[in-house]
Amino acid sequence: MTKPQDKDTVIIAFTGTLDNGEVFYTIEKDEPMSFVIGETSLPPTLEEAVLNMVVGDRQKVRVPPEEGYGPRQKDLVQTIDNPEMVEKLHPKAGMIVKLKTNTEGENNDVPATVIKVEGTKVTVDYNHPLAGHHLTYTVELLKIEKSN
């Protein structure tokens, strides 16, 4: 059977899990994902695994944090004194809030996870929730569309 090559379009289904077994993402067979080999933003380890599969193969692939959502950055955990936010949102640990940030003169809404609340001080984490985690994908190659 044929394996995909550079510039082929592949169609896959997969489930992404954390080391504790928690599922963080699923692409089902009835609504699969397609991408062009060599032209994707998927982690290189995942793309490399697909290159070694044939249609019908199912494989587990472990992706390190550096290829996934990056390592956790301690400087992205910050404590802010924000009485207005505490009064309006009543934040609790685990809650995701959108906070306004200004980067190079541009205002952006950035999601942050509330770590703790003490009075009007809120400790938030701007890291992506999957940052620092190894990600395991169970991938099934459904179809290969050969490039011309």
Image: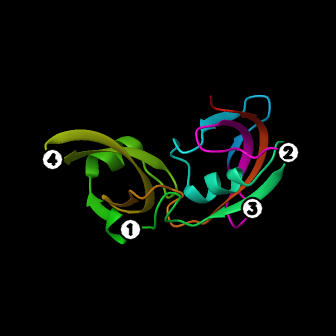
Crowding at mark 1 (Cα within 10 Å: few <14, some 14-19, many 20+): few
* Residue that label 2 marks: 1
Q: Say left or right for 23 vs 148.
A: right
Crowding at mark 2 (Cα within 10 Å: few <14, some 14-19, many 20+): few
The amino acid pointed to by label 3 is Gly
Give the distance between the C-alpha atoms of the residues marked 2 and 1, in whole angstroms: 44 Å
Give the distance between the C-alpha atoms of the residues marked 3 and 2, in whole angstroms: 32 Å
**4 or 2: tag closer to the N-terminus:** 2
**3 or 2: tag closer to the N-terminus:** 2
Question: Tag 3's secondary structure?
Answer: loop
Mark 3 vs mark 2: in front: 2
Q: Say left or right for 26 vs 65.
A: right
Q: Say left or right for 22 vs 40.
A: right
Give the distance between the C-alpha atoms of the residues marked 4 and 2, in whole angstroms: 52 Å
**Residue at x 50% of width, y 46% of height:** 41
* Residue that label 4 marks: 104
Residue 134 or residue 39, whichever sits in front = 39
* Residue that label 3 marks: 21
Tell whether position 133 is magenta: no
**Residue at x 51% of width, y 67% of height:** 132
